[in-house]
Structure formats: structure tokens, C-alpha cells
Image (cartoon, helix red, strand yellow):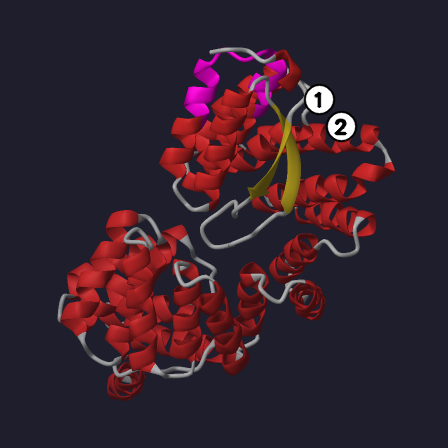
């Protein structure tokens, strides 16, 4: 390769499009710009080709171009940029291990590149490495703060990213604090409003959640994560129509999002739109065959409409993915009972209640367990408690409750 000294200061404008941290939240942290320093026209062409291919969705082709650029043995000044750009493409591709490896190399060559810390930080939660993710975002915050007021927007993005990892860790107050600082630094940071809104939802502060999420949507009407998060708030308040509308909007913006279909299916199941719910759960499964909650939800609807053979198949699939999930055990237990497998039902319900003895659904499960053991008075007491939490419904439970009442009277002296 012929090195052209006059090209040492050639810069190329690139764009980073960052996806979400996790399964159930589709969050676009920010669109930010960066300058890539390259040493020669040949390297410039390779990097440019890589970025163009990345923007067209040809991630393997983009990585190939960056590999060629690295093979040109550029200076450290150029190399750290190329490693970071390759990391960004690997992020888009879903290769989070590759992101961490490449941005670690980038940081070793240039410890002042905040974006390498930032991107590595939001890749780490995919391996449940939340503490190091927080450390990386803290480093990005420090660097942006040192850069001064011209980096307020970038500092805001880093605070919002750290807040999201704090949420994943369960440190909800810290998550609120970080996202609030992000908003103070950049009042138009839609991601920070959406992240904070989701934390308010987790804290059951529903009015605050709706306020933040609605403002995020106002700032960015094409922000599918905000619609998803607001839909979850409506769903928690049994506002099924509003939830359906928000989930449908999220699907329109991102039709490959399995969780949007799952959540819309839940809103439709709550509204007894069984056929529509089954279609949505099936779409969720088609997009993500490991979505255990979608299998379980579909099993519940199949149970509700008495399609017990299909229901037990879906319940088994859910438990194959997550064998110790108490909700999945409860579903299979009820379906086993409905299909005449009382011993299997008792096994599932006892394990379910041992794993989660105090949930809203526990009185339903305890009631059936008492019923199967012919302890009808205790079954009635449990189902009366359950009825205060959630209306008795379904083709199996209502007759069971009536039968328990009848059998209890027969056994009374």
C-alpha cells in the first residue's frame, strides 16, 4: 500500500445507530456522530465502504471492509477508530462478545474515546455483566464532563445508558436519578424520558410513567420503545384498548419485535379477544422461538377455550425453556387437571407454590390443590381470596368452584 502523507488528516463522518439492551425493552439510546481518522486514501475507501454496507444492513460485508482496513497496518490513531467502527457493526449484528473485544482494543489504543466505553457498556448487560457496564458508562460520563459544555448532549446519553443498566440491576432510585440528570443536561433526550418512564412503571407510579413516556413520544413520534413501555403501563391498569393501540403502533414501527406482539396478545386476551390473542402469541413465537412467555400465554388461551391438547403442548414448550418458572408450572398444572391427570396437576401445583407461595395467583393454585386432595372447605376459602384479587373465569375454574361448594355441603354434618 502506498502511504500518502498528505492524507494523514482525512476525516470521515460516520453514524452510530444503537439498539436496545434487552428482550422485553426495545430502546434506541441515541443517534450520534463521530469522526474516523484514517491514514491513507485506501484506508479511507475501505472504512467508507464498511460504513455504507452497515447502513444498508450488510453487516458481514461491513466487517470484511474493516478487517481489510486493519490489515493495512494503520497507525494507532487510525486503528482505534477502525476497531470502534467494527464494534459498532458487531453491535448491530448482535455479536456483543465481539463488541466488547473490539472496543477493549480501541480503549487500549485511545483511553479518551468516550464512545468506546459507552458502546462496550451497553453490550455488557447481554452477559449479565451489569457492574462493569455501569463502570464503562461512568467512564463515558467522566470523559464527556471533562470535554465541557459542548458535550452536554453526549454526557446526557451516557447518563441515560447508565440509568438503564441501573434499572436492570434493580437499583430503581439510582436509575431515576441518572435519567433525571440526563434530562437536565438535554431536555430533548427522548430515551431518558422513556427509560425513566419505564422505571416509574416498575415502581407502580403509573401517572408519572404515562407523563414521561408520552413526552418521549412527543419528542420522537417514531420511538417504538416508548410506545411499548407506555402500552405496558396501560396494560397494568387494565386499559386494554389504549394498550392495544400503543402496542399496534410499536408493531407498525418495528414489525420484527416479538415482545410487541406478545404484549398486544396479552391486552387482547384480557379483553377476551381469544382468536386475535392466539394470532399475536403465534407471531411472537414465529419471531422468537425461545419466547417462553408467549408459549405459556398461548397455552392459557387454549385452556380458556378448551383446546387442551394444544394447550398442554405449549405449556410443555414453555417449561422446556424455563423449567422452574412457577407461572408455567401453574399453567401446566391446571391443564393437566382439565385433561384428567390429577397426579401430574398436584405435582406441578405443589412445586409452583413452593417456588412462589405469595403471588396473586397462589390462592387459585392452592384452591385447586385443596380440591384435588378433597379438602373442599379450604378450596372454597382459597378461591374466595382469589376472587378478591382477580375475577374467577374460565371453563374449568367456575364449575370447579360450584362443585366444591356442592361437595362441601354434602360432607357437612
The answer to whether residue 165 is above or below residue 113 is: below
Dot 2 alpha-carbon crowd within 10 angstroms: few under 14, some 14 to 19, many 20 or more: many
Report the residue marked by disc 1: 112
Q: Which mark is residue 143?
A: 2
Which of the marked residues, 1 or 2, is nearer the chain's N terminus? Answer: 1
Q: CA distance from mark 1 to mark 2?
A: 7 Å
Q: Which residues are magenta?
A: 66-81
Which residue corresponds to the image point at 42% horizontal and 59% vertical from the top-left? 257
**Spot occupied by residue 92 in the image (x, y as percentages of width and height):** 46, 41
State yes or no: discs 1 and 2 in contact (Cβ < 8 Å): yes
Magenta stretch, main secondary structure, is helix
* The C terminus lies in quadrant: bottom left
**Spot occupied by residue 8 in the image (x, y as percentages of width and height):** 65, 17
The answer to whether residue 357 is above or below residue 14 is: below
Question: In the image, is 211 to the left or to the right of 116?
Answer: right
Residue 77 among those drawn in magenta? yes
Question: In the image, is 173 to the left or to the right of 64?
Answer: right
Q: Which mark is residue 283?
A: none
Which residue corresponds to the image point at 42% horizontal and 28% vertical from the top-left? 65
The answer to whether residue 233 is above or below residue 109 is: below
Residue 297: quarter of image? bottom left
The answer to whether residue 291 is above or below residue 105 is: below
Amino acid at each position: 500500500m502506498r502511504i500518502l502523507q498528505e492524507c494523514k488528516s482525512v476525516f470521515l463522518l460516520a453514524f452510530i445507530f444503537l439498539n436496545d439492551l434487552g428482550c422485553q425493552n426495545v430502546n434506541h439510546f441515541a443517534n450520534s456522530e463521530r469522526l474516523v481518522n484514517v491514514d491513507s486514501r485506501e484506508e479511507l475507501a475501505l472504512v467508507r465502504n464498511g460504513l455504507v454496507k452497515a447502513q444498508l444492513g450488510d453487516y458481514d460485508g461491513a466487517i470484511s471492509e474493516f478487517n481489510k482496513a486493519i490489515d493495512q497496518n494503520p497507525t494507532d490513531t487510525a486503528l482505534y477508530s477502525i476497531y470502534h467502527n467494527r464494534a459498532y457493526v458487531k453491535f448491530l449484528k448482535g455479536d456483543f462478545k465481539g463488541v466488547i473485544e473490539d472496543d477493549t482494543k480501541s480503549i487500549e489504543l485511545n483511553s479518551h474515546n468516550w464512545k468506546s466505553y459507552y458502546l462496550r457498556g451497553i453490550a455488557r448487560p447481554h452477559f449479565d455483566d451489569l457492574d462493569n457496564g455501569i463502570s464503562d458508562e461512568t467512564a463515558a460520563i467522566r470523559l464527556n464532563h471533562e470535554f465541557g459544555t459542548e458535550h452536554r448532549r453526549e454526557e446526557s446519553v451516557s447518563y441515560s445508558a447508565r440509568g438503564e443498566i441501573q434499572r436492570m440491576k434493580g437499583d430503581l432510585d439510582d436509575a431515576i436519578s441518572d435519567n433525571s440528570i440526563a434530562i437536565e443536561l438535554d431536555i430533548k433526550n427522548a430515551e431518558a424520558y422513556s427509560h425513566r418512564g419505564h422505571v416509574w412503571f416498575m415502581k407502580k407510579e403509573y401517572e408519572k410513567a404515562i407523563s414521561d413516556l408520552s413526552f418521549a413520544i412527543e419528542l420522537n413520534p417514531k420511538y417504538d420503545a416508548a410506545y411499548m413501555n407506555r402500552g405496558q403501563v396501560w396494560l397494568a391498569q387494565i386499559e386494554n384498548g389504549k394498550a392495544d393501540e400503543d402496542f399496534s403502533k410499536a408493531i407498525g414501527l418495528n414489525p420484527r419485535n416479538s415482545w410487541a406482539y406478545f404484549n398486544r396478545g396479552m391486552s387482547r386476551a384480557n379483553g377476551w379477544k381469544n382468536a386475535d390473542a392466539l394470532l399475536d402469541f403465534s407471531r411472537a413465537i414465529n419471531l422468537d422461538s425461545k419466547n417462553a412467555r408467549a408459549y405459556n400465554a398461548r397455552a392459557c388461551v387454549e385452556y380458556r377455550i378448551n383446546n387442551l391438547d394444544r394447550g398442554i403442548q405449549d405449556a410443555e414448550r414453555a417449561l422446556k425453556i424455563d423449567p422452574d418458572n412457577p407461572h408455567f408450572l401453574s399453567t401446566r398444572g391446571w391443564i393437566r387437571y382439565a385433561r384428567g391427570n390429577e397426579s401430574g396437576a398436584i405435582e406441578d401445583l405443589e412445586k409452583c407454590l413452593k417456588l412462589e407461595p405469595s403471588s396473586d395467583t397462589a390462592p387459585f393454585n392452592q384452591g385447586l390443590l385443596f380440591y384435588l386432595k378433597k379438602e373442599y372447605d379450604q378450596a372454597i376459602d382459597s378461591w374466595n381470596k382469589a376472587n378478591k384479587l382477580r375475577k374467577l373465569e374460565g371453563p374449568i375454574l367456575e364449575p370447579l368452584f360450584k362443585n366444591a361448594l356442592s361437595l362441601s355441603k354434602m360432607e357437612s354434618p
